[in-house]
Image: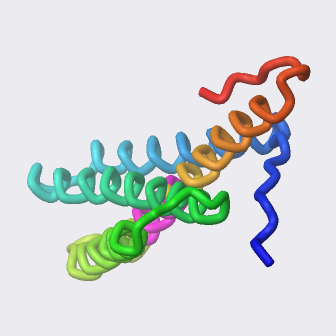
């Protein structure tokens, strides 16, 4: 028996707002911390690149998981690379913070802001996709922007 089709519900405005807030607060706080940090420019570049890589890998993984749920083909190699990329971004952040000459509170600050931004990116991607799918399934409803 085939798996039932995924039926997206329209996310509430509150969840959409909370998702965007999580993404923006996490990313802005992380970047503000980097801007004000007393570290070399190459260290700042490392942590900035990790944030961008982490956000991309988290969104890519979420999309791949959702594609598979909806029966859209995703190759095993790409799906596996998404998982490896997210794990690598988290591992590189962990190693970087472990070896950094920062106070424990600063390390926790960067880790929590990073994780909040990743969560927010995944939730925003999910909401965008849910709204688009809901609008396609219910053209009679007033359109809610998916972008």
Quadrant position of the N terminus in the picture: bottom right
Stretch of the chain drawn in magenta: 108-117
Check the image and report above or below for 121 versus 145.
below
Magenta stretch holds residue 112: yes
Quarter assignment of residue 79: bottom left
Quarter assignment of residue 86: bottom left
For this view, does 30 lie left or right of residue 6? left
Q: Nearer the viewer, residue 121 or 45?
A: 121
Quadrant position of the C terminus in the picture: top right
Magenta region, main secondary structure: helix
Quarter assignment of residue 25: top right
Check the image and report above or below for 63 versus 136.
below
- How far across and how far down the image is residue 53, in percent? 31, 56
Magenta stretch holds residue 113: yes
The residue located at (82%, 52%) in the rendering is 7
Q: Is residue 103 visible?
A: no
The residue located at (15%, 58%) in the rendering is 43
């Amino acid at each position: 028996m085939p798996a039932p089709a995924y039926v997206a519900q329209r996310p509430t405005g509150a969840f959409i707002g909370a998702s965007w807030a999580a993404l923006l607060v996490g990313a802005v706080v992380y970047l503000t911390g980097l801007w004000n940090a007393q570290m070399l420019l190459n260290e700042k570049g490392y942590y900035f690149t990790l944030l961008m890589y982490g956000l991309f890998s988290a969104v890519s993984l979420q999309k791949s998981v959702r594609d598979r749920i909806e029966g859209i083909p995703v190759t095993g190699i790409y799906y596996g690379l998404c998982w490896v990329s997210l794990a690598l971004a988290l591992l590189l952040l962990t190693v970087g913070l472990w070896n950094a000459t920062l106070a424990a509170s600063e390390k926790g600050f960067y880790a929590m802001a990073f994780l909040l931004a990743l969560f927010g990116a995944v939730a925003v991607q999910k909401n965008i996709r849910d709204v688009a799918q809901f609008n396609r399934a219910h053209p009679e409803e007033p359109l809610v922007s998916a972008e």
